[in-house]
Image: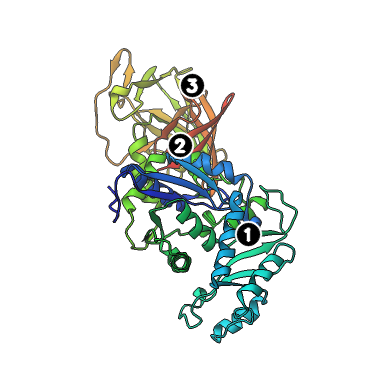
Amino acid sequence: MIEISNAEKGKVVVRFAPNPSGYLHIGHARAAILNDEIAKQYNGKLILRIEDTDPGRVDEEAYSAIEDDLKWLGVDWDIKIIQSDRLMTYENFAEQLIEQGNAYVCNCEQEKFKSLKSGKMSCPHRNLSIEENLKNFERMHTEDGLTVRIKTNLNEPNPSLVDFPLLRTSKEIHPRLKNKNLTLYPLMNLSVAVDDHLLGITHVLRGKDHLTNTEKQKFIYKYFGWNEPNFIHYGIMSIGSEGKISKSEIKKGIDEGKFIGWDDVNLLTLRALKKRGINPQAIRNYMLNLGIKDVDIEFSEEALYFENKKFIESSFRYFFIEDQVGLTIENFPNMLVKFPLHKEHTYGFRTFNLVPENNKIGLLIQKSDTKKLKEGDEIRLMNTCNVRITKTDVTTGNIIADYVEDSHGPMVEINGKNGEKKKFHNISKVLWLPEKENLPVKIYLPERTVAGVCELVCKNLKENTIIQFETFGFCRVDKIKGDMIEFYFTQR
């Protein structure tokens, strides 16, 4: 239960307010999930507010992408508001502030205004009469370069709180509105304060990085005589590599071919996590564990994987071999090998019918398992039997070995009898697959892509299934292309 003050069941109204400048990432998930959880716990309402009043930052694809990602996260909103539909509302409130004498129209260049502010001096437009400022406000509909500024304390210790801007003009075409005329756009603190009031927001839950914005918005509440909502600021969640979530960096990376898209597995967008097979409930549990404490933390992928493993640990297990080399075993008997699909044997088994030709059988093992092997070494084929190395081919890397008599285990049947459970000390265990019965696969991981082969039975898997490749990790089936499967790596 998330405990918040001044919360009455059935009357709590919260909001999640993303900017459609790109797709949602793990940082957005925190605000979305916490607000959604509060709305559900208090039988309240969640408003989805798309804050798209900066046309230069709007990505038209992001509108639908945001909704799709939130649905995947299990976030349920009651009302959707798009701020670009409400430009006249913000314009009217800016005009009212001018009529009160609490705002003015300024056309100072940015550097000049900054210099005046640092000297705690007012700009020449600040002291114009209300009538003159209202005339200048009308000019904003036809003349670019004008800004509405709110009047605050010129001696304010925090310079960003001094006469900050509320409304500006822009000739830039809005990707959604397709407007070709000069348009008045609110800046964030005006539109947010106005909407939070008009929509009846009772609790504003967001990160500590918005503390200054909260102070700015309080000026607007004060001048209009509005009751302030309850402001709750949780600690900042830093993410080790900002390039994994920075929308500008991701866009640049996509344009330069560094990323294949917003769902590239090197990113921490929700699309990328979904593609890898991360369960949305795992993300929710992780964020709920963080809660609304004001302590700054660093996002931990390992902690997220811990939560995710609870949802995927029952996945079926299979063998995968990367960078394979051949292993020819001589004096090999007919074997029927059964491997459990899971450590809990109640899930069933997969079987290999190993039939030698001329007392020999060809298998594949991983090259990394052969690096230190020499003639006379004994290795154990995983859950099967032991073989003794008789020859290694330096040119091809292929290995020849002899079957070790009576070394087969209880999962192996020879001549109708299963072997006994035995302990083999100081003997390396290696993965293996039949040389002629396997399936080529490609696995996409962050930072690299690997190719190899897996069990032939994997051809019966369904897309989006999560499986576990033993000693490698969990993977999600992405595409089955005839005799080829593509996976995305989920986690160890």
Residue 312 position within the rendered picture, expressed as x and y whole percent measured from the top left? 37, 35
Is tag 2's residue or tag 3's residue first in the polypeptide sequence? 3
Is there a contact, CB below 8 Å, between mark 2 and mark 3?
no
Residue 106 visible in the displayed image:
no
Residue 427 position within the rendered picture, expressed as x and y whole percent measured from the top left? 32, 39
Indicate left or right for 143 with 288 as reference. Answer: right
Q: Residue at x 52, y 76 (%)?
A: 162
Residue 466 position within the rendered picture, expressed as x and y whole percent measured from the top left? 43, 32
Q: Comparing marks 3 and 1, which lies closer to the viewer? A: 1
The three-letter code of the residue at mark 3 reads Asn
Observer-nearest residue: 302 or 252? 252
For mark 3, what is the residue? Answer: 460
Observer-nearest residue: 180 or 381? 180
For mark 2, what is the residue? Answer: 475
CA gap, disc 2 to disc 1? 46 Å
Callout 1: few (<14), some (14-19), or many (20+) C-alpha neighbours within 10 Å? many
Observer-nearest residue: 73 or 145? 145
When the figure is inspected, residue 372 is found, relative to residue 440, above or below; the finding is below
Observer-nearest residue: 456 or 77? 77
CA gap, disc 2 to disc 3? 15 Å
Is tag 3's residue or tag 1's residue first in the polypeptide sequence? 1
Callout 3: few (<14), some (14-19), or many (20+) C-alpha neighbours within 10 Å? few
Q: Residue 185 carries which label?
A: 1
Is tag 2's residue or tag 1's residue first in the polypeptide sequence? 1
Indicate left or right for 60 with 243 as reference. Answer: right
Residue 422 visible in the displayed image:
yes
Q: Which residue is drawn at 38% across and 53% down?
A: 202
Q: Is mark 2 on a helix, strand or loop?
A: strand
Q: Which residue is drawn at 75% across and 53% down?
A: 180
